[in-house]
Image (cartoon, rainbow, N blue to C red):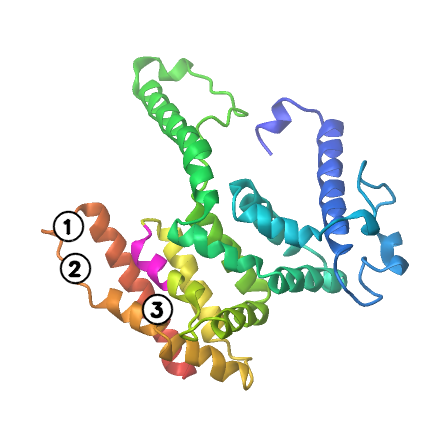
């Protein structure tokens, strides 16, 4: 609202907004071609008229697609960090769809769950995914340059010539990329906010295929709550667990299944393990002390929601 208006007139800004809105609709349109949906959904021929009549150049027909977009997305998610950024933006844009477009929104969420795309985020949380290596190789050096830029900017602002300094508002050199853990947690939190039932079903499917009948993704979230140095990540993990476990609208047998995963399959034990860790400021660095102290606070809030719910 401030920076762009200095460089573009109103007509150019409107044009840019129109292009962005059209691109979002086209991406949704392409994804929905793979959805098995009812007649009200844009993936059915009868409802395509509600979308833009312009097609993406070079997009192949359904018959010529060798695999679904969601299968490709899952494959790319395991090796390319940009796929995680795409998924995050996709979910955030889905949250903005109007009430009349609930069928489209639900179709995409269902496909994400059915293709087990969320389970690929386990590698982001524990650092074993090839996408994490991709982030370390490509994006970590850019983040280091961003930190150097921020330090230089601080020096300039603290120097005597700060009054004459005029920064370029369109310069993004000082903005770091989010970490893989941060993006994975944001994706899961958005999913928990919009479709908590489908997220619970993803946990159930994972547990059924596990030898110990555990949800590794749930356990990794509990572990991330302790180990993450980001307050935002810790808060979002807390919100995910509360939305998934303590929802007042759950019915049987869903309620019993999620309670079993949370209370009997190690998730609660992992939270209590963090809660009972010693917290000694004299023996810890300030960063570790704050991390563990904040994690304990989030766990106590989770327990506070569990008590009245169960």
Q: Which residue is mark 2?
A: 279
Q: From the viewer's perspective, tell me whether residue 285 is left or right of residue 31.
A: left
Placement of 94 over or under 11, stated as above or below? below
Q: CA distance from mark 2 to mark 3?
A: 18 Å
For the residues bearing labels 1 and 2, Cβ distance under 8 angstroms: yes
Residue at 50% x, 82% y is 255
Does the rendering let one see residue 92? Answer: no
* Residue at the outermost left position: 282
- The tag on residue 208 is none
* Left or right: 200 as drawn, with respect to 287: right
> What residue is shown with label 3?
301
Name the image quarter holding residue 307: bottom left
Question: Does the segment drawn in magenta span residue 160?
Answer: no
Q: Which residues are magenta?
A: 222-228
Q: Quadrant of the N terminus?
A: top right
Say whether residue 256 is visible.
Answer: yes
| Residue placed under numbered mark 1 in the picture | 284
Q: Between 219 and 1, which is closer to the camera in this rendering?
A: 219
Residue 293 image position (x, y, % from top left): 24, 58
x and y percentages locating residue 242 in the rendered image: 44, 70
Name the image quarter holding residue 270: bottom left
Circle 3 residues within 10 Å: few <14, some 14–19, many ≥20 = some
Q: Is residue 82 above or below residue 101?
A: above
Residue at the location (70% across, 31% down)?
13
Mark nearer the N terminus (1 vs 2):
2
Secondary-structure class at tag 1: loop
Q: Is residue 179 above or below residue 109?
A: above
Crowding at label 1, few (<14), some or many (≥20) Cα neighbours within 10 Å? few
């Amino acid at each position: 609202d401030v920076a762009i208006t200095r460089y573009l007139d109103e007509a150019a800004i409107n044009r840019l907004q129109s292009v962005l809105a059209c691109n979002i609709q086209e991406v949704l349109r392409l994804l929905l071609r793979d959805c098995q949906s009812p007649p009200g959904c844009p993936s059915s021929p009868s409802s395509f008229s509600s979308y833009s009549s312009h097609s993406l150049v070079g997009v192949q027909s359904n018959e010529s697609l060798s695999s679904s977009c969601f299968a490709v997305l899952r494959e790319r998610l395991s090796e390319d960090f940009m796929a995680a950024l795409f998924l995050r933006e996709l979910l955030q844009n889905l949250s903005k769809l109007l009430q009349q477009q609930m069928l489209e929104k639900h179709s995409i969420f269902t496909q994400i769950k059915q293709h087990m795309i969320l389970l690929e985020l386990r590698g982001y949380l524990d650092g074993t995914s090839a996408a994490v290596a991709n982030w370390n190789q490509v994006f970590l050096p850019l983040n280091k340059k961003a930190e150097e830029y921020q330090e230089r900017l601080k020096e300039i602002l603290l120097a005597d010539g700060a009054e004459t300094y005029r920064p370029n508002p369109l310069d993004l050199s000082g903005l770091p990329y989010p970490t893989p853990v941060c993006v994975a947690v944001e994706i899961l939190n958005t999913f928990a906010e919009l479709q908590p039932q489908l997220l619970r079903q993803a946990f159930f499917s994972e547990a059924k295929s596990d030898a110990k009948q555990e949800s590794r993704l749930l356990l990794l979230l509990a572990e991330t709550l302790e180990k993450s140095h980001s307050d935002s990540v810790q808060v979002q993990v807390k919100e995910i667990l509360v939305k998934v476990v303590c929802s007042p609208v759950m019915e049987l047998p869903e309620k019993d299944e999620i309670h079993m995963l949370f209370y009997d399959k190690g998730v609660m034990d992992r939270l209590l393990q963090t809660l009972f860790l010693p917290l000694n400021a004299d023996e810890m660095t300030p960063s570790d002390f704050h991390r563990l102290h904040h994690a304990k606070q989030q766990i106590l809030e989770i327990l506070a929601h569990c008590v009245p719910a169960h």
